[in-house]
């Protein structure tokens, strides 16, 4: 829902196995609003949810949101980007505005992030591709 806080229990309820080193693709369904004013009032991660993802030892969060942090229109003056600080501060990269995640729901996939190398920048546009991996058992 607009401005809804995503908590650790919401992530746990997804029932998806997260392995150390995984990329987690967070599909909130918000990509459907891209290009509309509604897109800017998106759900977002609580600091506890960002910490939970960190504890899963993920390497990257790919989300269908403009940011995993609070929407700009809801932020207090002293807002400090807690999801970004928790994740990036511990080496977990963040990829935002990812579309097409519905087709990959519940699957193990391989991602490729082809980002532009922009000098003196802390981010860049990227072409993001994903493909399903062959079904694996618990031993692979």
Image (cartoon, rainbow, N blue to C red):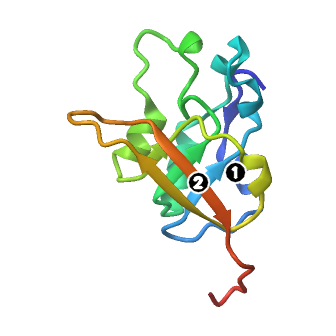
Question: In the rendered image, which quarter is residue 125 located in?
Answer: top left
Q: Is residue 83 visible?
A: yes
* SS state under label 1: helix
Q: Nearer the viewer, residue 114 or 24?
A: 114
Image location (x, y in percent) of residue 5: 67, 31
> What residue is shown at x 75% (from left), y 79% (from top)?
135
Task: List x then y, in percent, for residue 74.
Answer: 58, 13
Query: Is residue 132 depicted above or below 86 in this figure?
Result: below
Alpha-carbon span between mark 1 and mark 2: 23 Å
Q: Residue, x 35% and y 53% (percent of image)? A: 91
77 or 134: nearer the viewer: 134
Residue visible at 51% across and 58% down in the picture: 112
Location of residue 13 by image quarter: bottom right
Residue 21 image position (x, y, % from top left)? 48, 68
- Left or right, 106 with reference to 47: right
Q: Give the residue furthest to the left.
A: 120
Residue on which disc 1 sits: 11
Q: Quadrant of the N terminus?
A: top right
Q: Is residue 19 left or right of residue 102?
A: left
Label 1 crowd (10 A; few <14 / some 14-19 / many >=20): some
Q: What residue sits 71% from the left and 48% below the top? A: 101
Residue closest to the far bottom: 139
Task: Determine whether the residue tagged by mark 2 lies in a helix, strand or loop.
Answer: strand
User: Where does label 2 land, which residue?
Assistant: 129
């Amino acid at each position: 829902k607009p401005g809804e806080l995503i908590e650790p229990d919401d992530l746990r309820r997804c029932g998806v196995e997260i392995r150390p080193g995984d990329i987690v693709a967070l599909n909130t369904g918000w990509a459907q609003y891209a290009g509309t004013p509604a897109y800017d009032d998106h759900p977002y991660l609580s600091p506890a949810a960002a910490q939970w993802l960190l504890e899963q030892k993920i390497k990257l969060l790919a989300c269908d949101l403009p940011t995993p942090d609070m929407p700009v229109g809801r932020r207090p003056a002293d807002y400090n980007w807690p999801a970004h600080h928790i994740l990036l501060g511990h080496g977990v990269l963040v990829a935002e505005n990812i579309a097409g995640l519905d087709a990959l729901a519940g699957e193990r996939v391989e991602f490729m992030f082809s980002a532009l190398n922009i000098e003196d920048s802390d981010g860049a546009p990227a072409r993001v591709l994903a493909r399903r991996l062959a079904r694996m058992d618990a031993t692979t």
